[in-house]
Amino acid sequence: MIQITEMELLQTGEQLRSEALAIAKYTTCAQQTTDPKLQQIYSTIADRHRGHYETILRSVQNLAGQRQF
Amino acid sequence: MMEEKDRLTDSLVMQKYIADGYNSAAIEASNTQLKEAFINILRDEHLIQHEIFNEMSNRGWYQPKPANINDINQNLNKWNQELQRVQTTAYQRPGAQPGNYQTAFPQYGYQAGTGMAQTGSEVQQQTMYRPPQNPIA
């Protein structure tokens, strides 16, 4: 049974796109910066965005009744 | 090559954009679980944004100007008057019971360094405020 609306699918796509961009951006920042503290901060933030991506993906997969990864 | 300040500024802008997106996504979500997921992530996006802001602020790259004390008090007076006006209007409905509402309502004011209400006990404020019920629950 489908438990997700068209709007939810659209919004999910938008947010996943932003999260993917954020992961790439913060990973690059961590590589470019010469400040050790900022390097740590950027890496942690990239991980948190990766967590967001996975959380949303799992939520939608659950709603769609598919198996979790 | 971007400089440190540019990278942090770019990060701040990105966090604002993403947080806006989650706010819209949460509002548009019909499913309670998905809505909760968006709201939880929205909160984390705010925490990330604040972390970046603090880093910029500590480096002197983002220091919002404090408001003038006279402007603060002027605005608080205006907002208190507006609050009294809307409450008075609310109790002009037919059949409404004014009771001691005007005297019981807390007055908010500015105290340097605290940001708390000048008068009105916590108990009184709790009894006056009723949060809206969640229509989804």
Image (cartoon, grey):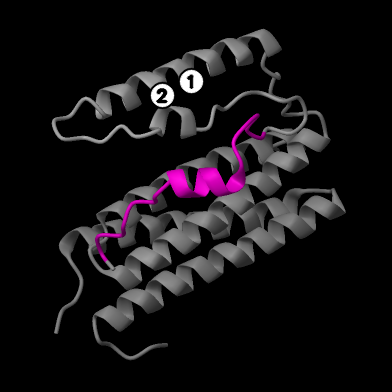
Q: Quadrant of residue A30?
A: bottom right
At label 2, the amino acid type is Leu
- In the image, are marks 1 and 2 on the same chain? yes
Q: Quadrant of the C terminus of chain A?
A: bottom left
Q: Nearer the viewer, residue B121 or A25?
A: B121
- Residue B65 in magenta stretch: no
A67, above or below B40, in the image: below
- Decide: marks 1, 2 in contact (CB < 8 A)? yes
Q: Nearer the viewer, residue A57 or B92?
A: B92
Residue B87 visible within the image: yes
Q: Quadrant of the N terminus of chain A?
A: bottom left
Question: x and y percent of residue A55 in the render?
Answer: 45, 73
Name the outermost residue toward the front: B99
Residue A20 visible within the image: no
Task: Please report the bounds of the magenta region as a residue range.
Answer: B116-136
Main secondary-structure element of the magenta-colored stretch? loop
B118, above or below B121, in the image: above
Q: Quadrant of residue B56?
A: top right
Location of mark 2 (residue) = B83
Chain under numbered label 2: B
Which type of secondary structure does the marked residue at label 2 adopt?
Answer: helix
Classify 10 Å Cα crowding around label 2: few (below 14), some (14-19), many (20 and above): some
Which type of secondary structure does the marked residue at label 1 adopt?
Answer: helix
- Residue B131 in magenta stretch: yes
At label 1, the amino acid type is Asn
Give the residue displayed 43% in from the left and 45% down from the top: B129
Question: x and y percent of residue B119 in the render?
Answer: 63, 31
- Left/right placement of residue A11 relative to residue B18 reads left
- Left/right placement of residue B80 relative to residue B136 reads right
Q: Nearer the viewer, residue B84 or B50?
A: B84
